[in-house]
Amino acid sequence: MKKRIILSLLSLATISFIACGGDSNANKGFDNSATGGAPAPEAAGTAATPTVGEYDPHRGEGKWNEENVKIAGLDKAMASKGESISQTKCMSCHKVTDERLVGPGWKGVTTRHTPAWIMNFITNPDAMIDKDPELQSQLELCLVRMPDQSLADNEAREILEFMRKNDGAK
């Protein structure tokens, strides 16, 4: 009986760990013509432009920056696609409210972080968690590292647009 319980718990833990996976690799769907986005609040003493090799807490770690993530008005079609993708890849660990499930809730995330930071985190979570003090603190609360969802660039952008819609962007 004990073996059956232990085996069941191990199976449940394994399923929970891999439940958020995905492997799409298409890269399209960016609007690079507009400007905007909600900037993260500046921390006291934070340099505006980090030197090479220095972690930028406003941009994160990855290929996304203010040059290649431009935000205009809400793109409802992208937000709809992002909602669908997030139902498959994100909502087993996150809620759209501020309530924590496994990971933190998404409410207000686009007001706390820049679009580039969000894109870098959802496409490059391991490097971000290793370097970002805020994410390291979040990991201490959640106790589970966000898995790499293997999001294509357009999927990450669509999820960002859904997050914006969730936060009331028009």
Image: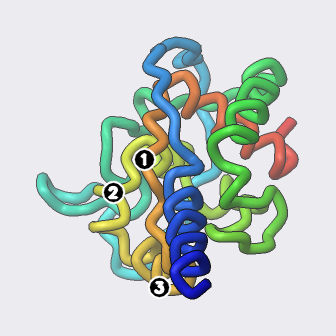
Q: Which residue is mark 2?
A: 126
| Of callouts 3 and 1, the N-terminal one | 3
Q: Residue at x 32, y 59 (%)?
A: 56
Q: CA distance from mark 2 to mark 1?
A: 7 Å
Q: Which residue is mark 3?
A: 140
| Res 33 quadrant in image | top right
| Of callouts 3 and 2, the N-terminal one | 2
Q: Residue at x 35, y 73 (%)?
A: 46
| Picture layout, residue 170 above or below residue 41 | above
Q: Quadrant of the N terminus?
A: bottom right
Does the image show residue 138?
no
Amino acid at the residue labelled 3 = Glu
| Picture layout, residue 159 above or below residue 26 | below
Q: Which residue is mark 1?
A: 148
Q: Position of residue 3 (x, y in %)?
A: 52, 80
Q: Residues within 10 Å of mark 1 (few under 14, many from 20)?
A: some
Q: Residue at x 44, y 66 (%)?
A: 145
Amino acid at the residue labelled 1 = Asp
Do callouts 3 and 2 mark residues in contact (Cβ within 8 Å)? no
Do callouts 2 and 1 mark residues in contact (Cβ within 8 Å)? yes
| Of callouts 2 and 1, the N-terminal one | 2
Q: Residues within 10 Å of mark 2 (few under 14, many from 20)?
A: some
| Picture layout, residue 19 above or below residue 35 | below
Q: Relative to residue 68, is residue 163 drawn left or right? A: right
Q: Return the residue nearer the eye: 151 or 15.
A: 15
Q: Position of residue 101 (x, y in %)?
A: 72, 70
| Res 159 quadrant in image | top right
